[in-house]
Image: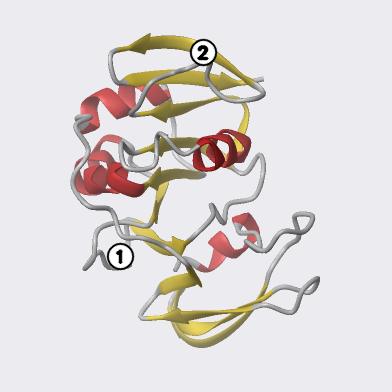
Amino acid sequence: MFIELTDHLRCTEPHNEQFLVLLPGVLDGRRVVSGDLGCPVCGKVVRVEEGVVDFGGGTAAAGPTALPAEAIATFLGLSGPGGYVGLVGAASSAVEALAALLPGIRLILVNPAIGALDSAAASVLRAGRLPLKSGSMRGVVVGEDLATSLQWVEDSAQAVLSGLRIVVAGPASGGAAGTEVLAESDGCWVGRRR
């Protein structure tokens, strides 16, 4: 886990959003290899092992996304380095190609396939609910495996900075609260956070 990612994480327990406190155990430059994240509201402690943050309850992506990395990059509409993009579920399979297309932007893999490792290009999170703070991401892409879950889509849309985009590999069905649907096709929609 990239150490600065701590500022963009939230506790997944059902209470008001709150920052997490990092107690690093082993660091490798800016990467947290092991340590703990604690919530000052509920006292939950989340372990970081081999760079992977496990909030509990996460289900690994079952397969790759049908969205090509080039399409994801185009749909996100980002230019310039800096910030974070979340790849949720099956969308995390596009990490390598997307990292090359979005240089200088850190990727966050939420519930990627089993075996996905924390790397210089991407941090790995496992959780039963999206652990990203509201208004903290330059974009979020939700894979096919989680696109039908209203909770995952709503939380992902909420995590995007105002004016930026969410890409969902699933039916639009009206988009998500606080999001304007910009485009949709069979099996994919793009929205902008208001």
Task: List x then y, in percent, for residue 166.
Answer: 48, 28
Q: Which quadrant is home to the C terminus?
A: top right
Decide which of 103, 132 is in the foreground and name it.
132
Three-letter amino acid code of the residue under disc 2 = Val
User: What is the x, y in percent for residue 182?
Assistant: 48, 10
Is 176 situated left or right of 30 in this image? right
Q: Is residue 136 above or below residue 188?
A: below
Examine the image and state in which quarter residue 52 appears: bottom left
What is the C-alpha distance between the residues marked 2 and 1?
33 Å
Question: Which of the two residues, 122 or 62, is positioned nearer the viewer here?
Answer: 62
Query: How packed is label 2: few (under 14 Cα within 10 Å), some, or many (20 or more)?
Result: some
- Where residue 31 sits in the image (x, y, percent)? 43, 73
Mark seen at residue 181: 2
What is the number of callouts on the image?
2
Sooner in the amino-acid sequence: mark 2 or mark 1? 1
Mark identifier at residue 57: none
* Residue 171 seen in render: yes
Looking at numbered disc 1 in the image, what kind of residue is underneath it? Ser
Residue found at x 67% / y 23%: 178
Q: How is the image coloured?
A: secondary structure
Along the line of sight, which residue is nearer the eye, 14 or 34? 14
2 or 1: mark nearer the eye: 2
Task: Indicate the secondary structure of the residue bearing disc 2.
Answer: strand
Apparent side of residue 3 relative to residue 85 in the rendered image (left or right): right
Q: Which residue is mark 1?
A: 119
Where's the N terminus, which quadrant? bottom left
Dot 1 alpha-carbon crowd within 10 angstroms: few under 14, some 14 to 19, many 20 or more: some
Q: Residue 113: x and y, percent?
A: 24, 58
Examine the rendered structure and indicate whether residue 103 appears above or below residue 32.
above
Does the rendering let one see residue 79? no
